[in-house]
Amino acid sequence: MNIEVQHDSRVKDAIAHWAPRFVANGVSLTDFQEVTASIARWDDWCRAWSARAAVHEEMGREALASQHFVSAGEHLQRAAVCYHFAKFLFVHDLAQMQAAHRKAVECRRLALPHVRPPGERVEIPYEGGKLYGILRKPPGVARPPVVAMAPGLDSAKEEMDAYEQPFLARGLATLAFDGPGQGEGEYAFAIRGDYEVAAKAVIDFIETRDDIDAERIGFWGVSLGGYYAPRAAAFEKRIKACIALAGPYAWAECWDALPDLTREAFRVRSKSADQAEARKKAATLSLEGVAGRITCPLFIVTGKLDRLIPWQHAERLAREVSGPVVLSIIEDGNHVANNRTYKWRPQTADWLAEQLGASRA
């Protein structure tokens, strides 16, 4: 006998809006449908997704033991993404969230030698501590250009594989990293509006490597990272080209319309005591008086149906920058146009490869 699960409002919201992102970034549609259908309360979200992630993790570990390394990489990467989505907005139960996060990091680390191309976990010195990233290089390319990839409020480097692949296929190296308030950087470091400080640390690290070309650096950001990337480009002139995906021009202007889960995640990751303090910190994430400093080529993408960050933010940024700009407004696109990735992922990758002079594969 089938019993219909009655979902609370937060789970209903998840089912209604998140499927395109999950599927575009490595969750199978069946997993999304089955797991979300089984969840009645938001309190059960992390547990349910962790249980599904464990299925993929077990297959990955079995493949490792059998020396089926390609399969191991695939299974463990999928496990990492599922653990990530177990954790990504589950800030009301930090112990459970951190347990899922540790598993996401572990599975991605285990996958790295076996994904194609393989990846390297790296440590980036930052304010007396470390930020962590994943460096991947295209095969057969000596000292390729590199794109530094900044996640958003609820994303992390463990979600980046699908974003990395178009660049790797076009001869660019990728350095996906967790900045302050993001992924492994969210525990010791708070979200900061002056993200150029973190960007400088990342670019300083790139300059220590002799296997990638520090003269050809791109900077990419998604969602709140779509604010971080142009903010970095405004101040850090070693960035030669920039991609901003669905970022806010001024985060505080979006505040009242944000879902409760998003506002609470920002509160926790900005180290704010309450929502009033969080709102004040949100106001520090602004490109007002800053956008005009952006002189490198910039590619901006937004979805006109974005319910989190209105498309007019992208339009304003494009209007105020001083350098060359491409503005792509996806008419039928949701947040980050995850429902229409074919309309911007290949296009932005082609553009950045041209800007940085990547070897054509």
Image: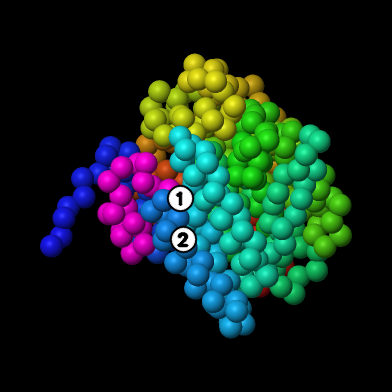
Q: Residue at x 45, y 50 (%)?
A: 86
Residue 225 can be seen in this image: yes
Q: Is residue 122 left or right of residue 111?
A: right
Can you give x and y, in whole percent of width and height, for residue 246 in the image? 49, 41
In the rendered view of the protein, which quadrant contains the C terminus?
bottom right
- Mark 2 belongs to which amino acid? Ala
Q: Residue at x 67, y 34 (%)?
A: 189
Point out the stretch of residues depicted in magenta.
30-46
State if disc 1 and disc 2 touch (CB < 8 Å).
Answer: yes
Residue 291 falls in which quadrant of the image?
Answer: top right
Residue with the mark numbered 2 = 53
Which secondary structure class fits the magenta region best?
helix
Q: Residue at x 25, y 44 (%)?
A: 7
Measured in 3D between alpha carbons, the distance from the residue under mark 2 to the one under mark 1, in whole angstroms, is 8 Å
- Mark 1 belongs to which amino acid? Ala
The outermost residue toward the left is: 1
Q: Which mark is residue 64?
A: none
Q: Is residue 1 above or below residue 42?
A: below
Can you give x and y, in whole percent of width and height, for residue 19 in the image? 36, 53
Can you give x and y, in whole percent of width and height, for residue 111 in the image? 61, 67
Residue with the mark numbered 1 = 86
Secondary element at tag 2: helix
Residue 348 can be seen in this image: no
Q: Is residue 104 above or below residue 98?
A: below
Q: Please tell me which residue lies in front, 199 or 167.
A: 199
Q: Residue at x 51, y 66 (%)?
A: 57
In the rendered view of the protein, which quadrant contains the N terminus?
bottom left
